[in-house]
Image (tube, rainbow, N blue to C red):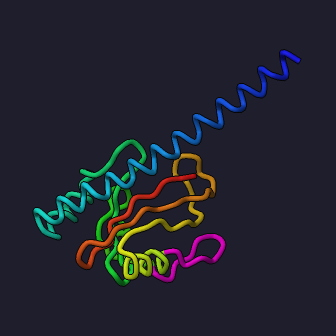
Amino acid sequence: MKKYITILLSVFFLISISTLNAADDKGNAISLVKNAIKFFNANGKEKALQAVTAGKYKQGELYVFCYDMNGVIIAHPENKALVGKNMLEVPDVDGKLFRKDIIEVAKTKGSGWVDYKYKNPKTKKLELKTTYLEKAGDTIFCCGIYK
């Protein structure tokens, strides 16, 4: 019985830590996006996109990237080869055109979260991902986390 209780407490502890880390990641993603938008508002679009591409808004595995309102990646610190590419019609593995959802949320709500599946570069596995987005002018600032 004692062993059973120890196992249950261990599982509960691990779930609690996992939940706290996810909440921390969500908060950090929002904070990174908001800081990038503050810079955008103070310094203009061109300097903000340069700062995002240079990795100024990175924290551990989290980073800000940007789309225009047509689904073109206009700033990306981790994969600069994507900059200038229209990703609107590129689906996730389940066929979800999640970038259309990102643009729709930006247009209708101004900010929010969009869920999809994406290959995690760290684990090399397909995982559930959620991206926080916020619109500033004609730019969508994003930061995604793996669930």
Q: Is residue 46 visible?
A: yes
Q: Residue furthest right?
A: 1
Q: Quadrant of residue 44?
A: bottom left
Q: Which residues are magenta?
A: 88-98
Q: Is residue 7 above or below residue 36?
A: above
Q: Position of residue 100 (x, y in %)?
A: 48, 81
Q: Residue furthest top?
A: 2
Q: Is residue 127 above or below residue 69?
A: above
Q: Is residue 12 magenta?
A: no
Give the residue displayed 44% in from the left and 74% down from the top: 102
* In the foreground, 12 or 62: 12
Q: Quadrant of residue 137?
A: bottom left
**Quarter of the figure that contains the N terminus:** top right
Q: Is residue 95 magenta?
A: yes
Horizontal relation, residue 85 to residue 146: left or right: left
Give the residue displayed 40% in from the left and 81% down from the top: 108
Give the residue displayed 53% in from the left and 39% down from the top: 20
Q: Position of residue 136 (x, y in %)?
A: 25, 72
Question: What secondary structure predominates along the stretch shown in magenta?
Answer: loop
Give the residue displayed 11% in from the left and 62% down from the top: 42
Q: Position of residue 75 (x, y in %)?
A: 29, 66
